[in-house]
Image (spheres, grey):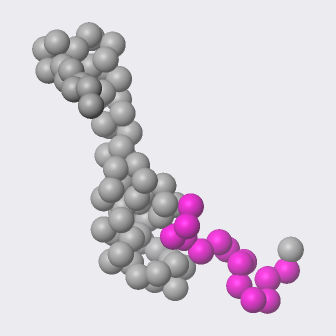
Amino acid sequence: MAKKNKKTWKEMSPAARAGFVVIGIGQVALMLAAQRDISKRPAAQINGPKAAWRVAALINFIGPMGYFILGRKRPGAGLGAVK
């Protein structure tokens, strides 16, 4: 198996550094948005336990995106919903 050459921060190009920072900021912003939504949304409007979604939202991009896609109940999605 080939060994990957990992570059240190000093060895990265300015564009690579900027991309790294932008992705990091985006990841943290998405995680904070998910955590805030979990805090403000009533438990009845969340699929599953809030505590489980809080932990899941800490997992890179996958957790917060999973929460926003799967964790929140859709308005009017109940049994008697009329379209």
**SS assignment for the magenta stretch, majority:** loop
The residue furthest right is 83
Q: Position of residue 73 (x, y in %)?
A: 59, 74
Q: Quadrant of the N terminus?
A: top left
Pick the front one: 64 or 29? 64
Give the mark count.
0
- Residue furthest toward the front? 1
As drawn, 37 above or below 14 = below
For this orientation, the residue located farthest to the bottom is 80
Quarter of the picture containing the C terminus is bottom right
Residue at left 33%, top 56%? 59
Residue 39 appears in the picture as rendered: no
| Image coordinates for residue 12, horizontal then vertical, percent | 22, 14
Residue at 30 percent across and 27 percent down: it is 20
* Residue 8 x, y percent position in the rendering: 14, 21
Q: Residue 79 magenta-drawn?
A: yes
The image shows residue 44, relative to residue 2, as above or below, that is below
Q: Is 58 covered by the magenta stretch?
A: no
Res 18 quadrant in image = top left
Residue at 36% x, 33% y is 23
Q: Is residue 75 visible?
A: yes
Name the side, left or right, on which 10 lies relative to 71.
left
Residue nearest the viewer, comparing 16 with 50: 16
Near-viewer residue (73 or 40): 73
Looking at the image, which is closer to me, 9 or 2?
A: 2
**Where residue 54 sits in the image (x, y, percent)?**
33, 69
Residue at 27% in and 11% down: 14
Magenta-highlighted residues: 69-82
